[in-house]
Image (cartoon, helix red, strand yellow):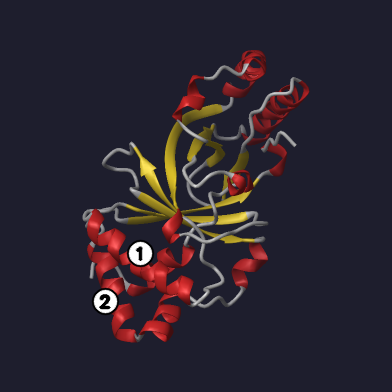
Amino acid sequence: MKITKTILALGASALLASSISAIAQDEEESYILEMTEVGIKLGHTAKFREAVKPYNACIAENDSDAEWSAWRNVGGEGTTYHFVSTMANWAEMDASDEALQSCWSEHMENIMAHVDSVSTSFARPMADWSGDAEGYDVVRLHQFRVDDGEMFREAVGGITSILKEAEHAHLGSWYDMIGNSSNEPDYFVVSHYDNFAAMDEDRAGPYSVVSEHAGEARADELWEQFGDALHDDWEYFHLMLRRDAELSHSGD
């Protein structure tokens, strides 16, 4: 096995949090998740936050349909914000939002003065592997680089099927990355928590649930298959984020 059962159990236990954003919960299963990661210059976090707030206010005042949730990294190198939104389809990118463009033109210089990097990625939900989640403010993204996609899908499909039959309380939602490069994750899954205190709870892990309901031999087989499907190098990595309500924006 390429990585330990403990790490695999941690990764599979995530079983994503219905998109990282409450925005996505009412969308069709075929929606596209758009995630923009913004790296902040050292010592500029407070200034960045103050620059974004009037931009959000401008959008609200001008009745833009734009919506997103904002998430800040916990731990790791530097400060990054992840702005998460959804699209029904790619055609939405052709649409013009005059209020959004006008507000961005007005506030872009002030915001970008504190930004070190920007990158955007896209993903689709995988409903067959997924459950529901809501009311959470802390998430852990578990990301996987896959060497054998067929083997990986078979393993995760087997695990999530058993977890659903067992009515596992922490089953979330998986996502398949779109157009990722060779050094980026192919799939990601997120464990979700109401708050940081919820991370202290003693949750039943997926391995123990699968083992109890399908037998230890079947659980070992699935976890072995899961590990063997991953890349030998940089096969698993994770990121913890907390919701930033002040920098999020909802049409409501």
Q: Earlier in the sequence, mark 1 or mark 2?
A: 1
Whether 136 is drawn above or below 79: the answer is below
Query: Where does the C terminus fall, quadrant-wise?
Result: top right
Q: Residue at x 57, y 44 (%)?
A: 27
Q: Is residue 145 above or below residue 94?
A: below
Residue found at x 51% / y 42% = 78
Please tell me which residue is depicted at 31% across the width and 71% down the height of the picture: 4
Q: Count neighbours of disc 1 (C-alpha within 10 A) and say few if under 14, some if 14 to 19, many if 20 or more.
A: some
**Whether label 1 touches label 2, CB < 8 Å:** no
- Tag of residue 48: none
Q: Is residue 104 left or right of residue 246?
A: left
- Would you identify the image quadrant in which residue 247 lies? top right
Residue 36, horizontal then vertical, whole percent: 50, 35
What's the residue type where badge 2 is placed?
Answer: Glu
Looking at the rendering, in which quadrant would you find the N terminus? bottom left
Residue found 26% across the figure and 76% down from its top? 221
Query: Could you say which quadrant of the image residue 151 lies in?
Result: bottom left
Look at the numbered disc 1 and give the secondary structure of its residue. helix
- Expressed as whole percent of the image width and height from the top left, the position of residue 177 reads 38, 44
Disc 1 from disc 2: Cα separation: 13 Å
Q: Is residue 153 left or right of residue 136?
A: left
In front of the other: label 1 or label 2? 1
Which amino acid, by three-letter code, is at mark 1?
Answer: Gly
Secondary structure category for the residue under label 2: helix
- Residue matched to label 2: 221
Which residue is the extreme one toward the right? Answer: 61
Which is more toward the observer, 40 or 241? 241
Residue that badge 1 annotates? 157
Q: Position of residue 77 (x, y in %)?
A: 48, 45
Relative depth, front residue between 174 and 106: 174
Occupied quadrant, residue 17: bottom right
Q: x and y percent of residue 55 in the render?
A: 69, 24
